[in-house]
Amino acid sequence: MKITTGIASTTHVDRHNERMAKSALDSMAEQIKERFIPQLIEHDPNQHIGVILYGEVFQLNDGEYALGIVSGLFENEQEKKNHKTGESNKVWQDHEKYLNIDELVKMNERNHQTIRANSSRKLNIADLLEKHLDSTQVLPDGTVYKIKRFITSMGDLKIEVYAKDHMPNPDHFHVISKQRKINARFDIKTLNHVKNKQGSISSNDIKKIQNFFNTHPEMLEFLKNEHTRLSN
């Protein structure tokens, strides 16, 4: 398995003005130690790409708390069979060593500095944390994870890349709007709009996205690096 680490959730106030209690994060960490929780792409059980192996709650520099996780991405069917959803997690102690909390905190700080330096709008803490995500969150029942990487956002449009996306050609990123039910794919090299997975994106929004990355080459480089990292 390919081992990855990241922040799954935090106690910060999100875009919906809601806050997750530290006790909820603690509960998630315990659930991860008790049984195998799958990693899914876009909550789709047919896109079961990995498993959560270890979770630990730690404090961020601003005093809030985060749930750090160690994930294993399947590289063959046997690994998937050995980590069946819901079965007892007897290997979490073997993966605790991979969670470098100091590095996660530093990455969070670097992401914060990058966005402040390069974004033309004021970002709230939820934006900064979501950008750091390698995985989103455990659902309320503790059984579902999905992997994604938030890059940036413009209004209600969010730029994301997914791990081991099932549409390999061309290499691409997603433009998402939950409000307008948009999920559009863009070629990561040419920035051309490829197709819509859901809904329809306007020509004006397409031009805005292309203009953003053309005028912020450091963000385009960050996008490409994250795509490469998640695809390997």
Image (cartoon, rainbow, N blue to C red):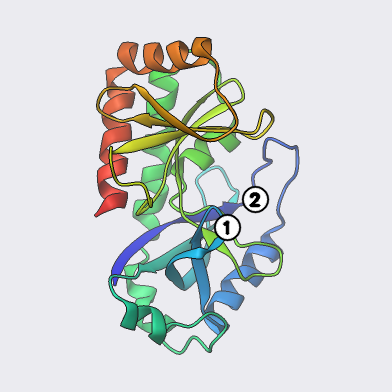
Q: Residue at x 46, y 48 (%)?
A: 148
- Label 1, residues with CA under 10 Å away: few <14, some 14-19, many ≥20: some
Comparing 44 with 142, the one in front is 44
Residue at which label 2 appears: 11
CA separation in Å, label 2 and label 1: 22 Å
**Residue 109: image location, x then y, percent:** 41, 38
Question: Foreground mark, 2 or 1?
Answer: 1
Q: Residue at x 29, y 75 (%)?
A: 76
Given the image, on which type of amino acid does mark 1 rest?
His
Q: What element carries label 2?
A: loop
Q: Residue at x 72, y 47 (%)?
A: 19
Q: What element carries label 1?
A: loop
Given the image, on which type of amino acid does mark 2 rest?
Thr
The disc at residue 43 is 1
Comparing 70 with 191, the one in front is 191
Left or right? Give the position of 31 relative to 218: right
